[in-house]
Amino acid sequence: MTDPRRTIPRTDTVLADPRLVDPLRRLGRATVKAAVAAAQQRIREAADPAWWSDPDLVVQLALAHLPRGPVEVLNATGVVVHTNLGRAPLSSAAILAVGQAAGYTDVEFDLASGKRHPRGESALHALRRAVPDAGDVHVVNNNAAALLLCALVLAQGREIVISRGELVEIGDGFRIPDLLESTGARLREVGTTNRTTARDFADAVGDRTGFILRVHPSNYRVTGFTSAPDLAELTDLGVPLVVDIGSGLLTPHPLLPDEPDAASALRAGAALVTASADKLLGGPQAGLLLGDAGLVTRLRRHPSARALRVDKLTLAALEATLLDPRTPVAEAVAAREPDLRARAEEMSRQLVARGVDARAVPSVSVIGGGGAPGVEFPSAAVSLPHRYAEALRLDRTPVVGRVEGGRCLLDLRAVPAHPGDEALVEAVLRCT
Ligand SMILES: *Cc1c(COP(=O)(O)O)cnc(C)c1O
């Protein structure tokens, strides 16, 4: 008997497919051929015989292997701020602002006087207004850049005092201690993994201290016999207190009572707060620096600040986000479980009517990306047979779900109801 895998379409046949004409022109034959080979290999390894002879699948898989621009995906993982999926989706106001800023703009120009003015002044103004407790503000490329600038300006050749419980790895091998030491600052670790006291900090502070750093352990939680001093206990040790809050909440969030925010940290006496703009704030990738006006001026004037600055598109998106905080992230956080359940039930009804083995199930979603570690939100999902997980990822509207208990779950918390639900149903039907 011939091996059914022999029926996998041959390379020349696949390369002649009209859908590969444009990629061949853009990327060259070698790249496309390699993608086809990878697709054939995947199919050869597939357990499902239906895969082996479907000529369409080779092309689809090959297309998925080709380098192309970013593809919009539906985030049905239940993780609201998903770093691998680009963290925060911008609000429509921010998207509009990016489009408007894309041409020539007044980013460093004062139209009233016809003279140069500070870069991104209107975005900075919006940030100052959002956090009146900050003496001044500055925006850099991301939170890592904000920390880098603090270390360069305040602690080069000096010491940063930090708790052993806050020596954090954020993800993808990015470790805050390594970042800080790369500036020539030394870390002075105090306390233990689970417990650090104000006294530990006080004993370590001396002539060589550049600043005390507190880091929000944003992706894990130490529970049990733990303690860490309140920020207010660390403000009169004669050195600046820098607080990396991570998530970018500017003010307290009613649904996330344990999540640190910039205004509260400043009010407690932090000299500087650093945060990401593309986590709970729901804006573009950027690093926010807020705090003492004198320190912010020193950060802004450091030669390295130029290498860390943000572009006009980021400034435009950030300003729009600050002016209208109704972002997709805010909506996903606020979505109520009964509403999500009703959506999952309606979608399952539509799918069952078309012969799909779908059902609405309870689900658990999280903030992710460095926000509210350990906090779980009850959610709802459409549960499908396992094979949909891959098929949906390869669809022309890629949907990224989560595999759990041998089923593919599409969690609706981070899916905008319109047009997300219709798009999801259509994608599932295309994969059926
Ligand atoms: C996410 C995070 C960072 C890194 O922020 P980027 O904006 O990705 O550079 C640093 N510190 C904390 C506490 C974080 O949660």
Image (cartoon, rainbow, N blue to C red):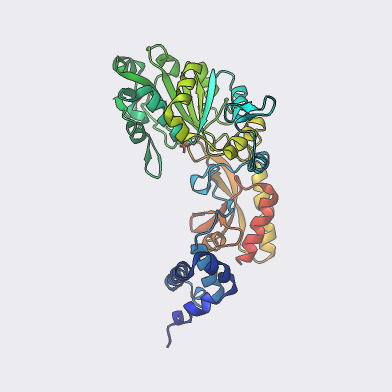
Ligand 1 falls in quadrant:
top left
Say left or right for 232 vs 364. left
Q: Quadrant of the C terminus?
A: bottom right
Give 297 or 371, whichever is nearer the viewer: 297
Return the x and y of residue 134 as percentages of the image width and height. Answer: 54, 19
Return the x and y of residue 101 as percentages of the image width and height. Answer: 64, 40
**Residue at image coords 67%, 43%:** 339
**Residue at image coords 52%, 79%:** 13
Q: Quadrant of the N terminus?
A: bottom left
**Residue at image coords 56%, 18%:** 133
Residue 400 appearing in the image: yes
Residue 259 appearing in the image: no
Return the x and y of residue 117 as percentages of the image width and height. Answer: 60, 26
Q: How many labels sit on residues?
A: 0
Quadrant of the rendered structure where residue 220 is? top left
Say left or right for 389 vs 193. right
Give 274 or 415, whichever is nearer the viewer: 274
